[in-house]
Amino acid sequence: MTIREKGYTHWDGQLRQTRFPWWPITRTGIKLAFKIKGFRLFFVFSLIPSFVYLVGIYISERMENFRFMIKGSEKILQINPGYFKSYLTSDFLLFMMVMLLVFGGARLISDDLKNNALQLYFSRPIQKKDYFLGKASILFFFLLILTLVPGLVFFLMKLIFAASFAFFAAFPWLLLSIVIYSLLVTIFFASYTLLLSSLSKNKRYVAVLIFAVYLFSDIIAAILNEIFRTPYVALFSLKVNLQQMGAFLFQQKAHYAVPWFYSFLVLAAVCALTVWVLGKKIKGVEVIK
Amino acid sequence: MAGLKRTQGSFSIRSVGEVFSFFLFLGRRAKKTKVFFFLSLLPVILVLVIKANQILSSNPSVSVTSVFSNILMVFDLQFLVLILALFYGTSVCSEELEGKTLSYLATRPIPKSAIILGKYAAYTLLIVIMMAISLILSFMILNSSRLLMVSLYPELLRYLGVLVLGLICYTAFFTLLGTILKKAILLGLVFGFGWESVIQYFPGSTQRFSIVHYLKSLLPSYPSGGFSFLLFRLEPTRPGLALLALALLTAAFLALACLAFTYKEYIFED
Amino acid sequence: MTAVIETKALSKWYGNVLGLSDVSLQIEAGITGLLGPNGAGKSTFMKLLTGQIKPNIGEVRISGQRIWNNFGLFARIGFCQEQDSFYEEVTGWEFLSGLLKFFHFSPAEIKTRAERALDIVELLKDKDRLIRAYSRGMRQRLKFAQAIAHDPEIMILDEPLNGLDPLGKRKLIHLVKDYKSQGKVIIVSSHVLPEIEAMTSNIVLIHQGKILARGDIHYIRDLIESHPHIISIKCSKPRELASKFIAQDFILKVTFGPEPETLVVETHNRDKLFGLLPALLIDNAIEVEEITSPDDNLQAVFDYLVGK
């Protein structure tokens, strides 16, 4: 084609739509997260409980060999839905997840706002939902490694160590509970993090907010419980709401006598707020008056 | 230019004062100050709820003294003070690096230590004001029926003094962290909510390796027959010594921060 | 003329990356242009001059005094940084007058100086707008204003023309030249030769952390002029066009490029070639698809100088 025939009004090349336009955002985000030393350390540290619980499953199948070690503690090593619930809703695991969000999640949107990168994203063939999904998927990746993967591994190893499907037959719904609870926790924490990350261009401020709001909700619930002596104040605590949902999904007795759907509504409200705030905050062009 | 005064190359309180006024102005303007001010008012909202419950309920579950020492002060001393000091303390240095505005300060005829001290003073004053408003309002709401009792106010002043000292000392520590570490917030969280929370319950002298021990040693002792979460497992240091320890710690943290900021090289992340 | 700024064997490493290598310069009053491609070490040099970073080897002296931790010297230095960063939640006026306080001026003097500086950069009418509402050009001008507001004797300007429109550039260049006539010491960095050329004839060429050349602009220009230019032409009849070029005395070399129907011409007189080309194309009915100049950039000049 000669110069005079070339123009910018027509394109002869092939346009190819990728199936997962959000994937490059996720892939890059995961790589960048692993580059942060502190994040790597915390991530490894947060996997320790899963190893401990896995060892517990092994010991539970070899009780006679380890009886000298676990005298009086045999009840803890009864592998039932309560065992899974105790891992997935443990204070330590939830706290470590929050710390990972502080390390790796605070900068997800705040850095883009600070560096005016939104225009770079939206001048590419991606939509807002791809951007959100891409960012959220970074958190999904790490959080699911801490929840879904250990849950499934525990289940699988229990079957393998027991060399029978009796456990599955006894609790056929357990796998579904593991999946649903893991997704619930992951989606909630991802929403929570993205919501706070979109509120400021300062990732340090967002990091403090992520930690403070989580801790503060717990403190407020404890204080209100002290005053009003009603279990419903536990709904103020994000951690307790997750634990209440865990208790329901694993068919265990909840710590607070509050119907599970109230906790679900609180968590869903946070997710809905996230969608609303992100819709307002994330724009390709910002008009400053 | 006629009448131009050139700065002498030595440390001056005036330089600290100028940095202080500039950052007090900036700090007041900042959006995040409004957010933290609202956060510091949450105890007031809590106290309003408690008061409403006391008025409406014929059998209130907790006494005013218990609310103040077991709820409010625990919340303020072990959460709010730490959050405010952590954010503002680390901001003294980190803010300039993240915002790439350090050059504006480092190329003025003021000593680098004046930048640290002036900014520290400005931010500490801001958070002290926030905390004071919160505590005084909460106290007045809780004791609304006995505001004319003069004997109440020394206790309020003492509690306020403890919180102010806490802010001063913690902010100094986090300022030091901010000048020497890139990820100061994270270590600050681990220190404030990990170390400080755990070590204070250790027996003997181990408690003395925390700032909160000296703060709690300055608290008024609980009336007999009552229980205080704050004084639980506390083996207090004498108040005079506790004050001295806090003053020395603050001075040491600030001196080290000034030293680090003066001699350390800060390279902007591109 | 005595040197105001002196650097001796100045070297700086960032980990394993060499930022600046063995730079020894003496800078007198007047405008010194620091020219180099991106990543050459200009900003590193500027930061060393202003004591923001410490050299690994060597030293920087201003009026005989070391700059590192010598804050007293900054009363005489104005620095305009490259980064576009401000305290965003204040107005231009508040920003400028706040920074002027650090010079211990009286409130009246601060007001006068701030107004004058803002007037010089034509931001007086926008002084009460928040900085985050400023355009790119306004922000750049404000940066320049904070560097001149205290009337410094030494001005160190790191890429001061970035983000300015052509009119803004022209005004700033004019301003810098005014300061030169007042006997000030001005160091300006840029990666755009015509910008530096418009301000001064005294240039320091920096590349990969080293000083490549120093001297008059005309010397640099001659080096560039003698550097042969390469032009690549993709057309329908490359061999016929080549035969026409070979007859011209200003054509140094003609080769056929790796791509089909591409002709690569080397000349030391680009203007003559482009003057002749249209006539050759029309007279011989040659259709041109593409004309490029692969080495038409500062990097190529530097590569040439390095090779020299």
Image (cartoon, coloured by chain):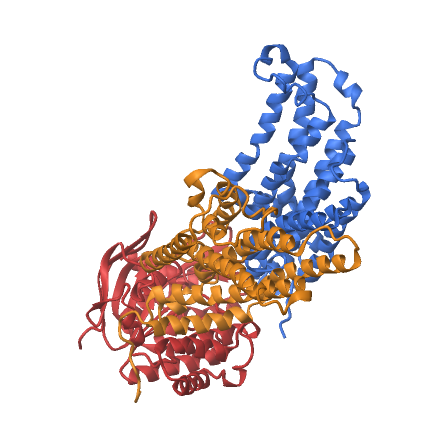
The answer to which image quadrant residue B39 occupies is bottom right
- The image shows residue C199, relative to residue A254, as above or below, that is below
The one of A179 and B204 positioned closer to us in this rendering: B204
Taking the spot 68% from the left edge, 31% from the top edge, the residue there is A86
Q: The orange chain is which one?
A: B
Image quarter in which the C terminus of chain C is found: bottom left
Horizontal side, residue C124 vs residue C270: left or right = right
Image quarter in which the N terminus of chain C is found: bottom left
Q: Where is residue B177 in the image (x, y as percent from the top left)?
A: 42, 52
Q: Position of residue A211 (x, y in %)?
A: 59, 49
Q: Which chain is blue?
A: A
Horizontal side, residue A273 vs residue A117: left or right = right
- The image shows residue C243, relative to residue A212, as above or below, that is below
Taking the spot 53% from the left edge, 85% from the top edge, the residue there is C125
- The image shows residue A180, relative to residue B208, as above or below, that is above
Q: Position of residue B162 (x, y in %)?
A: 50, 58
Q: Position of residue B78 (x, y in %)?
A: 55, 51
Q: Which chain is red?
A: C
